[in-house]
Amino acid sequence: MVGSDYYYIPTGIDKKVARHIIKTIDEIATDEIDSMVSGDVVNKKLRNSTQRWIPTDNWISGMMAHFINEANRAYFHFDLTGWADKVQYTYYKGEKSHYAWHADTLPSGLNPGDVRKLSISLLLSDPEEYEGGEFQLLFRDRRQMFTVKPELGSAVIFPSDALHRVRPLRGGKRVSLVGWYGGPPLR
């Protein structure tokens, strides 16, 4: 499904594959930390979740790269060079777990001179496992908004400079993978 500012892919990842992805992450990325904003700052009013980091050469990152490259080929046509940073495993649990309005515009942590251009959010939770937690994307025209409670295994790909958020949970847990593909600065 394509909107004016996003590309939505029902990837076919089912509950069994999602569990395998989570098990793999538990084995390779054991350091769970409070999620940060603006580099290494923890601010639970803006972002209340935990995170772990996955290397970009892992099979999980490769699968996500395929989704980003397909969306870019079919729709965005950005000049991309690859991952801008490691892939983030994000865990929202309990009431008021959220991420306020923000954009993902940062310089690449992996490729000096590059910037984040496309963001991906891949859901590993069944929507029945949590209340609230909808993903919202404000279109660049600032007059329209895309709101979705993605199905398990669905990926939303969008320009990294687009404002977006995860609405507060009212209960349960929401698990996602988030990543950023980058390239030379936009002109």
Image (cartoon, rainbow, N blue to C red):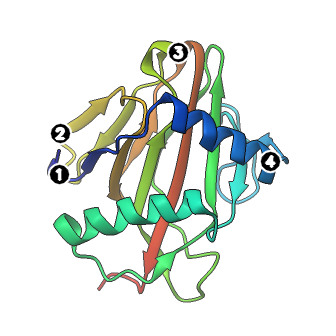
User: Residue under circle 4?
Assistant: 27
Residue in the foreground of this view, choosing between 20 and 185: 20
Q: Nearer the viewer, mark 3 or mark 1?
A: 3
- Res 26 → quadrant: top right
User: Residue under circle 3?
Assistant: 129
Circle 4 residues within 10 Å: few <14, some 14–19, many ≥20: few
Amino acid type at mark 4: Glu
What kind of element bears circle 2? Answer: loop
Q: Is residue 138 left or right of residue 179?
A: left
Amino acid type at mark 3: Glu
- Res 77 → quadrant: bottom left
Q: Earlier in the sequence, mark 4 or mark 2?
A: 4
Q: CA distance from mark 4 to mark 1?
A: 42 Å
Where is 68 relative to 73, above or below? Answer: above
Q: Quadrant of the N terminus?
A: top left
Amino acid type at mark 2: Gln
Question: Do residues under tags 2 and 1 come within 8 Å of each other at their CB atoms?
Answer: yes
Numbered tag placed on residue 141 in the rendering? 1
Circle 1 residues within 10 Å: few <14, some 14–19, many ≥20: few
Q: CA distance from mark 3 to mark 1?
A: 33 Å
Residue in the foreground of this view, choosing between 124 and 43: 124
Q: Earlier in the sequence, mark 3 or mark 1?
A: 3
Q: CA distance from mark 2 to mark 1?
A: 7 Å
The answer to whether one can see residue 29 in this image is no
Q: Earlier in the sequence, mark 4 or mark 3?
A: 4
Q: Nearer the viewer, mark 4 or mark 2?
A: 4
Residue 176 x/y as whole percent: 54, 39
Numbered tag placed on residue 144 in the rendering? 2
What kind of element bears circle 3? Answer: helix
